[in-house]
Amino acid sequence: MNKNLEIIQQIFQEAIRLDCTQDQNIEVNYHSGSKRLRVEIAYQGNPTFNDGLTRSYSVSIKNLDLLNKVLCEIKALEIIDDDLLGD
């Protein structure tokens, strides 16, 4: 279970980091009754009408493989800064 806890902590850290640095809203919740972690990622659409794309994950905290997959998905969201236009 220690490995699972490490991955859950990484998921929270990545979510906070991406929320602060990217144009995505990320929400992470832990439900103690069902022992599930829920991650919701909302991509920027029109915030007035809430019409952007939302991706959700709900995974048991006991399932190490699925926790790793969620962490990989969150890490894949990182957008590399592109200086193509010379900003």
Image (tube, rainbow, N blue to C red):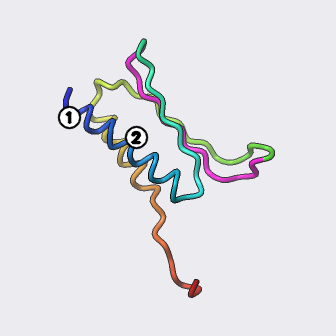
- How far across and how far down the image is residue 63, in percent? 29, 27
Q: Which element carries disc 2, helix, strand or loop?
A: helix
Residue under numbered circle 2: 12
Write the residue at 51% across / 82% down: 83
Q: Which mark is residue 3?
A: 1
> From the viewer's perspective, is the residue at label 1 or at label 2 nearer?
2
Left or right: 58 with respect to 52? left
Q: Is residue 81 left or right of residue 67?
A: right
Q: Is residue 77 above or below residue 41?
A: below
Q: Please say if 4 is above or below 14.
A: above
Q: Which residues are magenta?
A: 34-47
Q: Secondary structure at mark 1?
A: helix
The tag earlier along the polypeptide, 1 or 2, is 1
Q: Position of residue 64 (x, y in %)?
A: 26, 32
Q: Quadrant of the N terminus?
A: top left
Q: Which residue type carries mark 2? A: Phe
Q: Which residue shows up at 53% across the image and 38% down it?
A: 27
* Quadrant in which the C terminus is drawn: bottom right
* Picture quadrant where residue 35 is located: top left
Given the current orientation, which residue lies at the most extreme bottom position? Answer: 86
Q: Amino acid at mark 1?
A: Lys
Q: Residue furthest top?
A: 33
> Outermost residue toward the left?
2
The residue shown at (40%, 28%) is 59
